[in-house]
Amino acid sequence: MPGANPVLSVVVIGFRMAAQLANTLFTLGPRYQRNVERLDYEVVVVENESDDCLDRAQLDALPANFRYFRRREQGRSPVAAINLGFAESRGDYIGLLVDGARMLSPRVLEYATLAWRMDSDSITTVPGYHIGNEQHHAISDASAAYAAEAALLASIDWRANGYLLFEVATIGGGNRNGYLQPFMESNCVFASRRHFERIGFADARFQLDGGGSINLHIFRALGMHPRTRLVVLPGEGSFHQYHGGVTTRAREDRAAELAAHKRQLHGIWNEGFHSLRREPFLLGAVTPWAMPLLEHSARMGQVRHQRLRGLGQPLWQDDEDLAADRYFNPTAPRRVIEDSGT
Amino acid sequence: MKRHHDEAPVAAPAAREPIPFSPLPTALCAEAMPCIPAAAEPLQHLDGAPRLSVIVIVYRMPRQAMNTLRSLAAGYQRGVTPADYEVLVVENESAEMLDAAAVAALGPQFRYYARREVEPTPVHAINYAASLARANMIAVMIDGARLLSPGVVSYALAAQRLTRDAIVALPGYHLGEKLQQEAMLAGYDENVERELLAKIDWPADGYRLFEISCLSGTSAGGWFKPMGESNFVAVSRELWHRLGGFDPRFNETGGGQVNLDFYKRACELPDTVPVVLAGEGSFHQFHGGITTGQAGEIRRAIMAAHFAQYAGLRGGPYKPPDKRPIVLGAFPDNAMKTVELAARTVRMARGEV
């Protein structure tokens, strides 16, 4: 049971994906996450009503440190649900999973908390994968995809050893060149409450289907502050389950939908939106399962560096623009975070 | 003969009878994962003291040692100030000594001690320096010929926040394309090395050291395989005392395998966590050291004595600790090729590629 003031709150949003959400919630529980026996954390689950919500048995199975909220949503965006999750959360440190279909590997909470202990201005994320051997938006037969994924998950004892998820997953398309590159999006991000406050939590303008690019916006907004430090957990992962998401399922109007997302994002970021171009700080053990992505990331990192060097451009433009220090000086005076919005 | 310590190769040279008690290779880390419980305590600092004491041992290598000390100066080390750390330079007497004034000029955090030594080992100098250290974390650089990359001090301070039981270690490199004990046979010497350093305009950007170096024997395969030792190894003061410092019985030339022994003993305590600063490194300069600057039969005889002493004291040949480390820090672009190699090496050892 969490105390009255847990250190860490993980906010998870779900909509019409009961089976996938139940899996994700299992990966956040104390039976699955390792070395969290002494970590006072809570999981705040917010589910928008649909014809496929968590049922009574699934709710009863939630561990004692989980709190569940079901709400009716008139629109098509999870933004209000996210902000309800923030409002209900009590920790000074918050993890956000906008997409409840993302299972986590077993040391995400341990290492994310370490990152926060090391630097309370850290913004921590994990590399993204898709379950199965193809990108989910390329799948045309939904019912076959559900069955195939269920079979894949049943073929490994992921509840006992979550690292086995790496064996049935593909590198996600969101950061297809790996994590030693600018980061476009994070579907699992941790930051101090004060940083979420600074960016105004989830921006209510993101009312497109599925919230549009709200997760890209939140991630970049958190990262664009000179005090924040981007931390990547190279040995961990978040694993997307197929669930007919707005941008992760095949649909005829996917291109038009993505274009609308992009238009909105670029409209909100005056200078135009781009991936977060800050040098990642790595933390955590790298399991053998995660080694292929590290190798891929290093290879693609070299390609990028050669290209940019040839162009005479900096590798980490946002670090330069923010005059950010990639080093760690615990004795440097801490500046108060300015309420400068994004 | 110079009695300076440096690392031993993991395996004996090919096509030769192995040297008795050669270190045993350890291909992969243990399956068990490192554990830093949420309730682990960060290292507490002592009032009015620096946060890290770095011990640098020097013997008959003034030019190389001055370079090493330059790589420890604030400015080269990034993100830190002289108040954050101290550097204890202990030099055993020889005909070629450092210029104490030049060391002092590097900054107020540098303290220099010259001492007389009757045994051919740096162990007593190390333990003496530790008795003078003011910080709650003690780092040992047993070989004063090792240049550092610019994030080492900063990231060692970051590691203190994770747990007081961290053992901070660095991958080791040799300047030049090949291990220096091999390269010297093809003409590698101090002049070649000077040119190499000039080529990268050292010390303007210390990360460029990656461009002119190769992984050393005990770090071969990169840092995702068990490392044999670290030429910058930092532990808490409490852990230092629990281990009894460096074992003074290692009185072979250069301390024999004492540096490996200390790292292994620290890693094998149940509650300690190795933290590898994977994007940083220590870079060995050529200086005619005991195991990196001797050729042929002389080197072989020295190694045999080192291995035999280790086996005599510990009951068998050295085997690197296989505890899986936590990786900490950024990867500079210059190190990216080595990162790729390190990851690939593990995959090959597992038969995946």
Image: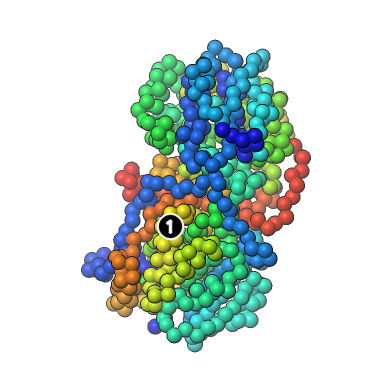
Whether residue B261 is visible here, answered yes or no, is yes
Residue at the (55%, 73%) spot, across then down: B131
Left or right? Give the position of B9 relative to B75.
left
Residue at the (49%, 42%) spot, across then down: A35
The location of residue B286, given as percent across then percent down, is 45, 73
Q: In the figure, B88 relative to A262: above or below?
A: below
Left or right? Give the position of A331 relative to B249.
right
Q: How is the image coloured?
A: rainbow
Quarter containing the N terminus of chain A: top right
Whether residue B216 is visible here, answered yes or no, is no
- The residue under label 1 is which amino acid type? Leu
The location of residue A65, given as percent across then percent down, is 56, 31
Q: Which of B287 and B190 lies nearest the eye of the viewer?
A: B287
Q: Which of A24 and A123 lies nearest the eye of the viewer?
A: A24
Check disc 1 and report the residue beneath it: B269
The location of residue B107, given as percent across then percent down, is 66, 72
- Secondary structure at badge 1 equals loop
